[in-house]
Amino acid sequence: MYRIRAVEEEIARRYPEGKMRCPVHLSIGQESIPAAFAESVNTTDFAVSTHRGHAHYLAKGGNLNAMIAEIYGKATGCAKGKGGSMHLIDLAINFMGTSAIVGNSIPIGVGLALSAQLKGTNQVSCVFLGDGAVEEGVFYESVNFAAVRGLPVLFICENNLYSVYSPLSVRQPKGRSIAKMVEAMGLKVAIGDGNDVISTYNIIKHAVTEIRNSSGPQFLEFSTYRWREHCGPHFDNDIGYRTEQEFLEWQERDPLRCLEDDFKQMPSSVIKQFDEIKAQVTADIREAFELAESAPFPLQSEAYEGVYA
């Protein structure tokens, strides 16, 4: 959780320098879901994500140096500088990609689950999505296909209440539960507090275990909240689509601070270990940005290499 938070805060701090020339969608405030996911899956399991994918990439074990280099558009980036923030990928740990198109990665994750089922590999395919993605037709096609085929796929919905600047109230019928709607389509579902990392871990771990034991697809909906603007490094409460009061109430439920408060009740050895983690994370981030700034840009002659069409 701290690693994800610190990395994204450093991206936000440096972004105004103008060296990161791609859009960035930060997930500061939503760290407990990817952190719990990290402790629940294996390296061999698949994962796909969205335009807001930094946290998922890091949680799956993605290379921090390669991620920052990618955001800087450098040849050492995880997509060789061609994709930027919204197109992260690391085949070495089966993080199979993120996409700028809402809902676009959902059928990819389902297809990966189908491949695991056909090959009998006992892998689980995890599909991250936001609440806005359930308004895309491909979501329903994918869920239906997963249910019909009993695929080993876990849909993880991070419901942060907004699709860009539109709240759920103007996008979906009043009183609708996304999870209950999906349950009616034949999937086992669970709902959780996405700012409580321990309960989130228990829910994800249980679902992954059941799916690995051939229980079929599952859908998890976690409530959470992004602190910063939809796209970019700043805060945007001033533009009126959400209230300052709402923002402050969610900030009081900061998942990282809540966990740190729990640490205060633990032995000094635990607190010392967390301090050591912070120091290591700080060093890792400094190195990642230094390497990104010094790395070369891709050659123009390589523009079409590694591009699928």
Image (cartoon, rainbow, N blue to C red):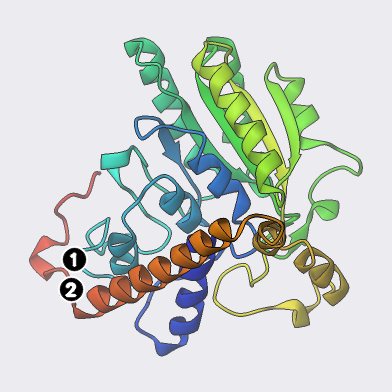
At label 2, the amino acid type is: Phe
Q: Secondary structure at mark 2?
A: loop
Which one is in front, 169 or 60? Answer: 60
- The furthest residue to the left: 301
- The furthest residue to the front: 268
Is mark 2 in CB contact (under 8 Å) with mark 1? yes
Residue 41 in view in this figure? yes
Indicate which disc residue 67 carries: none
Cα distance in 3D space between marks 2 and 1: 5 Å
Q: Which residue lies at the image location 42% right of the left edge and 53% below the top edge?
A: 58
How many numbered badges does the structure rendering display?
A: 2
Residue 146 in view in this figure? no
For the N terminus, the image quarter is bottom right
Q: Quadrant of residue 68?
A: bottom left
Q: Which residue lies at the image location 36% right of the left edge and 40% below the top edge?
A: 96
Q: Secondary structure at mark 1?
A: loop
Q: Which residue lies at the image location 11% right of the left edge and 69% below the top edge?
A: 299
Residue identifier under label 1: 75
Q: Earlier in the sequence, mark 2 or mark 1?
A: 1
Q: Which residue lies at the image location 77% right of the left edge and 83% below the top edge?
A: 238
Residue 148's x, y, as percent? 58, 11
Q: Quadrant of residue 103?
A: top right
Residue 216's x, y, as percent? 57, 14
For the C terminus, the image quarter is top left
Q: Is residue 115 above or below residue 176?
A: above
